[in-house]
Every structure is written in structure tokens, then in C-alpha cells.
Amino acid sequence: DAGITQSPRHKVTETGTPVTLRCHQTENHRYMYWYRQDPGHGLRLIHYSYGVKDTDKGEVSDGYSVSRSKTEDFLLTLESATSSQTSVYFCAISESWRNYGYTFGSGTRLTVV
Amino acid sequence: AQSVTQLDSHVSVSEGTPVLLRCNYSSSYSPSLFWYVQHPNKGLQLLLKYTSAATLVKGINGFEAEFKKSETSFHLTKPSAHMSDAAEYFCVVSDRAGNQFYFGTGTSLTVIP
């Protein structure tokens, strides 16, 4: 997990509150991704970024927004958390996916009560 | 559309015996394929990747995988299982642009002493 840090590692929040997860990288990689991991679903892409201020939706983007104002930071916001968003969230980075694939962070375990 | 199917949700082997984790993919083009491993409460680590070079790909920790276009398969193998191989394994295919990766639902490998 060297070069990529997620914060917080664990969070419990109440339904209806906003939550922001942070992904920070020191690799200067162009691409950054947010995934969620749920039993029986593997990992599913929420949003990704291909540069500062350049982002796009993944397959499960409803209820989530992202921002990338600096190369090193990629923020994931749950605007109004719901119990269905209880999950483990992984950030990933890549410079050249074709050559290297992803490097993943250690994950954030989010519980919405 | 791209997708991967991991044919076994759980595989159990004895230490020292061969490992076979099966993955079939669906893609309308020649894909890039990856295997990742996730140890308990950890992030995901790249095991190996296929990106249209040699069809037999060698990865870390003695794992290898063979790309078989005629069978649309990318099975992961290891000649002799070690206790430290117990983990969750994910087969992954990229989209054509390389912007999104699609994960299988995972195979949990148990190694019996």
C-alpha cells in the first residue's frame, strides 16, 4: 500500500448525514478510482478521475460525488448516507493501467446506522 | 460489455497440492486481464497481468495464468499451495479504453495444513 493512504480507516455515521472519504497518493499518478466492495459483488467502480478536475462516473455512482482539486487527493462524498452505502471503500491509483494495473489503498470500512 | 465470471466462490486445497482458480471472461475485443489477491482486512495486491503479450503469464509468489482466447479463460494456477496463499482472489478485465476495470465476485482460497 505504499504511496496511497485512505482516511479514515473506519467510520460509523448516521443515516442522512454527509460523509467524505479521502484518498491521498504520493506517486503522482494520473488516474484515481473509488470502488466499493460488498459480499457477492466483488469490487464495483463508483467514480474515477483521469486528471485534476477530470472525473467520470462508474457503474454505481448514484448517491456519490467526487472531487479532485490536486493530483494527490481524490475525495468521495456521500451526500446523504443511507444504510445501503454501508460497505468497504477502496481507493486505487494507476499511471498506466495497461502496464501496471492498479495500486490499492487499505480501505475504509463505513457503517451507516 | 465486458464481464468476468469466477466459476468457484470457494476452493479448498491441502498444503503442497496444486491450486486452480477458474476465470472466464466476456469481451468484444482482445482484453487486458488481471488477477488480484486480498488477504484478510487488507487492500488488493496485483498478482499478474495479461496485456496481449505472452499468453502464459507468470506472477508473484509462484502463481501463473494462461490466456486462452478460444476458451475465453484466464485461469490462475500454482503448483504447490502454501498456507500463506489463503486469501480472496479476484479476476479482473478492463474496458477497451482502459478507464474501467470489471471485477469478478471473487474466489476464497482455503489451504488445509
Image: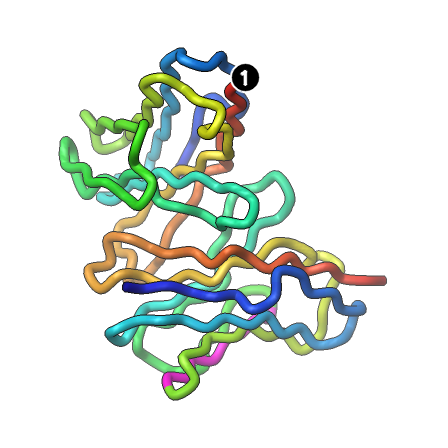
> As drawn, is B42 to the left or to the right of A89?
right
Image quarter of residue A12: top right
Q: Residue at x 76, y 68 (%)?
A: B13
Which residue type carries mark 1? Answer: Val
Residue, disc 1: A113
Mark 1: secondary structure: loop
Q: Residue at x 54, y 23 (%)?
A: A111
Image quarter of residue A82: top left
Q: Which residues are magenta?
A: B62-69
**Furthest-bottom residue in this view:** B70
> As drawn, is B14 to the left or to the right of B76?
right
**Furthest-left residue in this view:** A53
**In which chain is the residue bearing label 1?**
A
Q: Nearer the viewer, residue B19 or B95?
A: B95
> As drawn, is B33 to the left or to the right of A62?
right
- Is A60 contained in the magenta span? no
Q: Residue at x 22, y 64 (%)?
A: B96
Q: Position of residue A23 (x, y in %)?
A: 36, 30
